[in-house]
Amino acid sequence: MDEFDRKILRVLQDEASVTMAELADRVGLSQTPCWRRVKALEESGVIERRAVLLSAEKLGFSVHVLAHIRLRQHDEETLDLFEDTVRAHPEIVECFVMSGEHDYIVRVLARSIDHYEQFLRKVLLHLPGVAHVDSGFALKKVKLTTYVPV
């Protein structure tokens, strides 16, 4: 990956809908070599997909919850079932396997504290293998980005 590739990635992270002509102009290439580079970045998996970023708050999801989850057992079947079930719930927008005291951390978007409480009672506590959920509420968003520093 060279500086042209990094420039392409920076522009696309900022504006995924930029035309190929605009992209080529911004990074200092002609259209065909720029297009080839974008295709190579897509085929190699560096560019996973392009997306539209929505405002959770403007759509009514003003509560961000980080829930630390501990499982009762750690057999492969339980872990796979837990992860598959998490993927099926759109309110869970991020999930990471953790080292340390907790097995997973999930970020949940909720419309209110009451909405989260219902989600906790009806979903999180019933995920496969869950022994304990420790929830923390974000008080203020300081930084939330999808950018990768290239």
Image: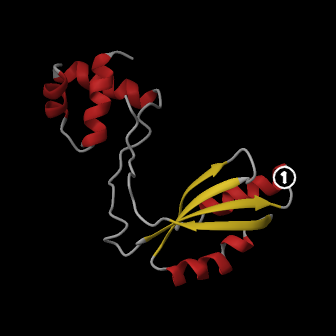
User: Residue, x 31% and y 71% (percent of image)?
Assistant: 58
Q: How many marks?
A: 1
43 sits left or right of 74 in the view: left
Q: Which residue sits furthest top?
A: 2
User: Residue, x 37% and y 66% (percent of image)?
Assistant: 56
State which quadrant residue 33 falls in.
top left
Residue for badge 1: 74
Query: How did the renderer colour the structure?
Result: secondary structure
104 sits left or right of 150 in the view: right
State which quadrant residue 140 falls in.
bottom left
Bin the neighbour count of mark 1 within 10 Å (Cα to Cα): few under 14, some 14-19, many 20 and up: few
Instruction: Tell me the element at label 1.
Output: loop
Q: Amino acid at mark 1?
A: His
Q: Quadrant of the C terminus?
A: top left
Looking at the image, which is closer to me, 6 or 33?
6
Horizontal and vertical percent position of residue 117: 59, 80
Horizontal and vertical percent position of residue 71: 79, 60
Above or below, comparing residue 87 to residue 25 in the picture: below
Q: Quadrant of the N terminus?
A: top left
Horizontal and vertical percent position of residue 129: 80, 64
User: Residue, x 32% and y 54% (percent of image)?
Assistant: 52
Horizontal and vertical percent position of residue 143: 38, 51
69 sits left or right of 52 in the view: right
